[in-house]
Image: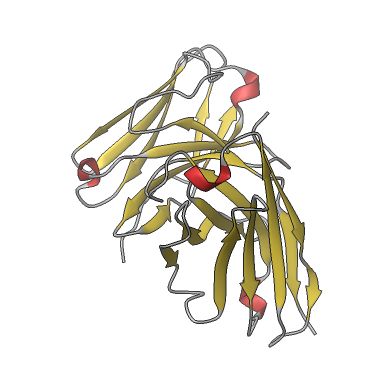
Amino acid sequence: SYELTQPPSVSVSPGQTASITCSGNKLDDKYAYWYQQRPGQSPVLVIYQDRKRPSGIPERFSGSNSGNTATLTISGTQAMDEADYYCQAWDTDTAVFGGGTKLTVL
Amino acid sequence: EVQVLESGGGLVQPGGSLRLSCAASGFTFSSYAMSWVRQTPGKGLEWVSAMSGSGASTYYADSVKGRFTISRDNSKNTLYLQMNSLRAEDTAVYYCAKGSGNSGSDAFDVWGQGRLVTVSS
């Protein structure tokens, strides 16, 4: 079965750039999606189709997908961005999530 | 406002059954695929099942295939998940999620607040 691998944790200082990776075999043959989940809340879509932002998502969130790796980049990270982030892709009518990355802003 | 709201859930014994419902509002329900996604407390997200907008196509994770059944009533704007032969490992918060398109292979762009299902004797 298809697998997506994320680092368990990433730390960033306020105002700096955070990058969260998601690895999967030939991932760029698929679309990558990214979700933010703050503690005690439901997930929120922040990037779809590799690099598109839903309305209401700040411009500091961006995405890319090349080769085996998709990347979520948060520029000018703010304290409110501290959350768990999950990547997701579809593989033969099955949705697959990465294990999640805890972003700490310190 | 586009919303999905789950109901049902609770405590059930191993081997038992439970049905979750998801009421949708603010969008043309029949035009969008819908999914169920679960999250074990303190752990990651796991996709469970999806259904196309018309209801003609259904998809399941291997972990629930043959035990869970997804369905929808487009006249009532409601999605369901019938869960049978429940196991301890099915204990999780279950989210209803709206697809951004009709086919099922799209983003999950709206999520419900989640319902806790606990399987325990």
Colour setup of the view: secondary structure
Q: Residue at x 64, y 72 (%)?
A: B82
| Relative depth, front residue between B74 and A24 | B74
Q: Is residue B50 above or below residue A87?
A: below
Q: Is residue A42 above or below residue B42?
A: above
Q: Residue at x 68, y 69 (%)?
A: B91
Q: Quadrant of residue A30?
A: top left
**Screen quadrant of the N terminus of chain A:** bottom left
* Residue A91 horizontal/vertical position (percent): 30, 56
| Relative depth, front residue between A54 and A85 | A54
B76 displayed left or right of B120: left
Q: Quadrant of residue B72?
A: bottom right
**Screen quadrant of the C terminus of chain A:** top right
Q: Is residue B114 above or below residue A18?
A: below
| Relative depth, front residue between B25 and A72 | B25
Viewer can see residue B5: yes
Q: So how many labels did they put on this image?
A: 0
* Residue A53 horizontal/vertical position (percent): 44, 23
* Residue A58 horizontal/vertical position (percent): 52, 15
* Residue A57 horizontal/vertical position (percent): 53, 20
Viewer can see residue A106: no
Q: Is residue A101 above or below residue B78?
A: above
